Image (cartoon, grey):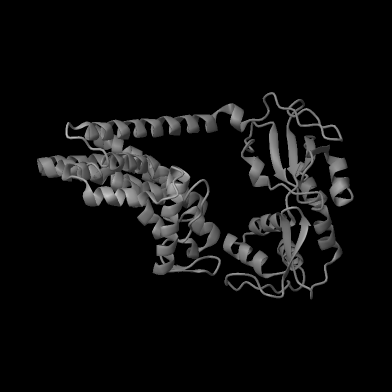
Amino acid sequence: MLWALAAGAAAGGAVSSRPWVGLVCGTTLIAVVWGAEFMKRQDTPGWVSRLAGLLLGGTPFAALLFWWNSLLFGHPLRLGYSAAFGPAHSLGFHVDPWGNRYGVLEALGYTGADLLQLGVRLIESPLPVTLLVAGALLFAPRQMRGRLQLPGLWAASVIVANALYWHHGIHFGPRMTYESIPGWMGLIAIASTTAFKAGDGSGPRFARWAVGMTLTAGLVLGISTLTSAMSPKSSDLSQDLEIPAGRQGGPRVGATGKTIIFVHGSWASRVSAQLAASGMRRDSIETALRRNDLCEVDRYARWRVTPNGTPPSLDFDSRPGSPSHLKVQLLSPGNRIRVSPSVSPDARCRREARSDRLGVLELEVVAWRAPALPEANIVYARDLGPGANLRLLGDSGNEAVVWIDREGAEPLFMPYREGMQLLWGGPGD
C-alpha cells in the first residue's frame, strides 16, 4: 500500500509538471511493473487496494493542477498552451496554429525523423538505434526479449505520444524524449548484449548491471540538474555581480536598492509583448507578424492600447508562410522584419526600426537568471521605449540600466538616460 501511495504521488507530481509526458510515462511504468506482478500472482484483492492507494497518492497533485488551471486559465482542464494559443494547439490530427496540416502521414514523417535524431543526439550514432533494438527483438532468446519489455515500453510510449502532437521541436534532441532517456539507454544496453551473450549467463548479468548503472546515472543527473537550477547563485545575480562597464561605465548591481535592467530586444518582440498584454492570443499574434507589414502591426498594437478611430486592417488568415508581396528587411544582425512596399512608415515606426540598429537581445534569454521576485534587487525588463519605460520606473527611485547587445563587440551597460538618448533620441521625460 505504501508503495502504491508513493507511485501515485510520483505520477501526480510528474503530471503536474508536464501533463502529457507525465501521464504517458507514469501510466506506462506503473502499468508494466504491476502488470508483470499480476501475471505472476493473479492477486485481484491486492490489486484493488493498490489501485486505491495509487489514486489516493495522486489526488493532491490532481487537485493542485485543477486549482492552478482554474485560477490562471478559467477551467480545471484548460492548460496554458490552449489559453495562449487557442484550441489548434491541442493534441490530435488537425491544422496547427500556424495553418500547417498535421495528419497521419505528417505524424509518420516527423516520428521517423525523431527516431533518427534520437540516435544522433543521444549516442552520436549515424545509424538508427531502432535497428539494434529491432534485431534484439527478432533474434534474441526469449528470456532476453522479456528483459526488453519495461525499458522498451518506457522508450516507445513517449514516441507514440509525440506522434499525436503536431509540435516536433528539436532542442538538444527530439521533443519529449528527455524523460525516457533512461529507458532508451537501458533498451540499447540490453539489446547490445545479444551480440555477445555467453552460455554461462554473463550476457544477462551485464544487462542487469547496464540497466542499473543507466538508471542510477539518470537519477543522479536529474537531481544534480534540479539542484543546480534551484541554487541561489543560478537565479539571483545580486551576489558578487558587477555589470561589465562598457564604454559608458556601468554601476554596481545591487549596491543601492533595486536595479532595473532594461533589455533592448527586437521591434517584433516589443510589438508581440504589447499585443499579448492587450489580451490577444499568441497564435493570432504570430499570424499577424508573419502575414503583415510590421509597421501596420505596430499601428494596430497602438490602436488596441488607445482605440481611437479605425484600426489598421490586418491579415489574420491562418495559412502557412507569408504573402509574396512582403519583403524581408535586415535591421541588425539576426533581426529581420517584414515590410510591404505599399505601406509608408510613420515617424513612430521609423523610430522603432532605428532603435534596433546597434543589435538586439531578447528578454526571455536573460530574465530567467534574475526572476522578478519581491525580494530581488535585480529585475530585468523589456525596453519598450522611453514613455512605456517611465510607467514602470514611476517614482520608485530605483537605479535603471540599459543593456544593449552588439554583434561582434562588448555589450553596452549604460545609465538609463544615456541609453535612452542613444537608442531612442531622448529619455522620454
**Nearer the observer, 233 or 193:** 193
Q: In this view, does 408 lie above or below 306?
A: above
Q: In this view, does 63 lie to the left or right of 358?
A: left
**Nearer the observer, 312 or 150:** 150
Quarter the N terminus occupies? top left
**Nearer the observer, 334 or 258:** 334
**Nearer the observer, 116 or 96:** 116
Q: Position of residue 348 (x, y in %)?
A: 83, 61
Q: Is residue 355 above or below residue 366?
A: below
Q: For the view shown, which residue lies furthest in the top direction?
A: 240
Does residue 427 show up? no
Q: For the view shown, which residue lies furthest in the left direction?
A: 42
Q: Is residue 88 above or below residue 233?
A: below
Q: Where is residue 11 in the image (x, y as percent from the top left)?
A: 34, 42
Q: Position of residue 119 (x, y in %)?
A: 43, 48
Where residue 292 sits, quadrant-wise, is bottom right
Residue at horizontal 69%, vertical 23%? 240
Q: Is residue 83 left or right of residue 373?
A: left
Where residue 337 sits, quadrant-wise, is bottom right
Residue at horizontal 64%, vertical 46%? 364
Q: In this view, does 55 lie to the left or right of 401?
A: left
Q: Where is residue 232 in the image (x, y as percent from the top left)?
A: 58, 27
